[in-house]
Amino acid sequence: MNYYARFMRILAVTGVPLGIWAVCASAMAAPRLPTLIPEIARSIVIVQYTAENEFHKTNKVSGQGLVLNKRGVVLVSSDLIPQDIPLAYIHHLIIRVAAGDMPKIPAQYLGRTVDGLFCYVRALKPLAAPPLNISATAKPYLAQRVFSVGRLGKDQAYAAFVGVNRIKAMIPLVHTLLATESFGLTDANSPVFAYRTGKFVGITVPNPGDGMILTLLGRSVPVTLRDNQQVGMFVAYRSFADDLAHIPTHRFVVKIPWLGTLDSTGLRPAVRKLYNIKQPSGLMVGQVIPSMPAARGGLKSRDIILTVNGRPFAHTPVPVLMVQRFEHVMQTFKPGEIIKFGILRNGKPKIITIKVGSAPIPPSRLPRYYDRKIGLVVHDLAFIDTYSRKLPLTQKGVYVVLVHNGKPASLGTTPVQPGYIITRVDNHRIANVVAFKKLVTKAENTPGKSELVFEVIKGNGRTAACHVSLN
């Protein structure tokens, strides 16, 4: 008989009240937090960088990072390095170890996880911080007591702090989110552990805020309260286990699985009743983009997807959750894999096969060019730039990202506007940023040249001509 069992038997014999039993049992089952917490805290570093655009507008960014291995790879929240920020805007990326004189270690951005939850950065010099110990993991459950470890801000010398809370809800979205009581855990991207066993159960996510009603002078006003250093939600380890099992060592570009559909919706009760669908979940296909994987596989708008490789992809009757669970299942596939979809078309069952493609490159990762003389920032056309205007996917040109106020492109009777697509420069067709730069630079260096004429496509799809002075 082990010590714990013997101790409980003594309590029973001596008639100790049940409430005292619970306290003693909790104390004995809990880990040695005074020893465990400092060990966890040593694996939490601070990741910082300066975001600066072409017009030299800057923003200092700072957040927590978790050391994953001895090579200095650190996991950070995707909110710290958003998808829509061009990598060219990230300057002076560093990692700070919250110990000693808190040295600044230069770092490199490596890439983003397929699920979009996290990014990886890597220290370019030895990092005096041990990897986070996640060898022992557990599945979280309702009413479970958990704790997280984070670091306070710079003004508090990045001191370690702890949050202890209890899980009150499990939310099966794209990832399984665990909601706790308001403001109970530590900052976003903090590791979360089971209080009694010390096993790793997840990572906190940015705080969405808590809705509350403020009553003042007889009037009630809904407000959202947020605490940047305390959150009430974390994502379960099993949702991102693959991200920690395959840690990159070099820079990479993630290939996100994609079918080529937009605006799909969850199956509503009326549709289920109409087609006598017994299972609770399904997906009503919205737009099917021509020449993309779904279209090539024969999927059509208003098809109802019921199964993926012979199995239902969700078991919820809530339409919004159906869509999110479908997205989660799609993330488990890789571009190039073949999927069999069980669909209902006009009330008749059908099996179609689709080869998974790769999502289009986002605008923030496309080549950019800033012409300082006329004050214009452009990038290569992205899928969304053409599709949103119902233009052919083969459309050529460049997309206007920014226009510098006071510079020639912003002046005159026909100024260039952000969101325009430039298709011609002085009646010469342009295919991309390289061609645009070549023609504009040549015109700027041509003696006697007084203006540039851009043929553009506006946001409404109409064409126009913009005259930009070179004087």
Image (cartoon, helix red, strand yellow):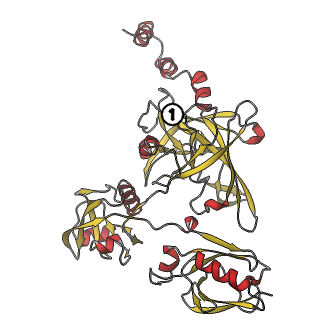
Horizontal side of 309 relative to 291 (left or right) equals left
Q: Is residue 161 left or right of residue 445?
A: left
Quadrant housing the C terminus: bottom right
Does residue 82 appear in this view?
yes
- Is the residue 306 above or below the residue 105 in the image? below
Res 183 seen here: no
Q: Residue at 48% of width from left, 74% of height from top?
A: 383
Q: Residue at x 57, y 49 (%)?
A: 77
**Residue at disc 1, secondary structure:** strand
Q: Position of residue 7 (x, y in %)?
A: 44, 10
Give the residue drawn at x 47%, y 21%.
29
> Would you place residue 209 above or below residue 151 in this image?
below
Count of number-bearing discs? 1
Q: Position of residue 444 (x, y in %)?
A: 73, 83
- The residue under label 1 is 193
| Nearer to me, 337 or 425 | 425
Residue 5: which quarter of the image? Answer: top left
Question: Going by the image, does 304 lie left or right of 119?
Answer: left
Q: Hey, which quadrant is residue 141 in on the image? A: top left
Q: Where in the figure is residue 305, as x and y percent of width and height?
A: 28, 66
Residue type (three-letter) at the residue carrying disc 1: Phe
Image position of 432 with respect to 44: above or below: below
Mark 1 crowd level (few <14, some 14–19, many ≥20, 10 Å Cα): many
Residue 277 placed where, x, y %? 23, 65
On-image quarter of the N terminus: top left
Q: Camera-side residue: 356 or 159?
A: 356
Residue at x-position 59% and y-position 58%: 82
